[in-house]
Image (spheres, helix red, strand yellow):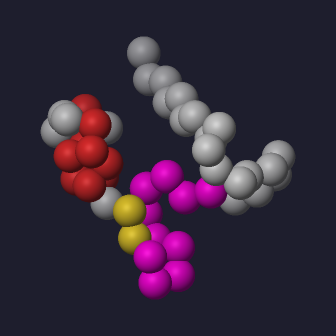
Amino acid sequence: MDLTVVDLTAVDADVDDVVTLVGRDGDDEIRVEDVARQVGTISYEI
């Protein structure tokens, strides 16, 4: 089963806002490897 849950409690986001979970947004980039490292797993699990 594939499921993604994101807690935006501490983020100033509203309904219909565009958010980037993984990828590029202008000059900024969030890599899968970085997310995996933060949660203590490997990129294939993300």
Q: Tell me residue 17's x, y (percent).
A: 76, 56
Residue found at x 20% / y 35%? 40
Residue found at x 55% / y 58%? 20
Q: Tell me residue 23's x, y (percent).
A: 43, 63
Q: Which of 12 and 17 is in front in this view?
A: 12
Q: Which of 16 and 2 is in front in this view?
A: 16
Q: Can residue 43 be seen in this view?
A: no
Left or right: residue 41 compared with residue 17: left
Residue found at x 19% / y 34%? 41
- Residue most toward the front? 10
Q: Tell me residue 29's x, y (percent).
A: 40, 70
- Compared to 5, does 43 lie above or below? below
Predominant SS of the magenta segment: loop
Left or right: residue 4 compared with residue 39: right
Q: Is residue 29 visible?
A: yes
- Residue most toward the top? 1
Q: Nearer the viewer, residue 32 or 9?
A: 9
Tell me, yes or no, whether the highlighted magenta stretch contains residue 20: yes
Q: Nearer the viewer, residue 26 or 7?
A: 7
Q: Quadrant of the N terminus?
A: top left
- Compared to 24, does 31 lie above or below? above
- Compared to 42, does 2 lie above or below? above
Left or right: residue 13 compared with residue 26: right
Tell me, yes or no, whether the highlighted magenta stretch contains residue 25: yes
State the extent of the magenta-drawn residues as a range.
Answer: 19-28
Residue found at x 62% / y 44%? 10
Q: In which quarter of the image is the C terminus?
A: top left
- Residue most toward the right? 15
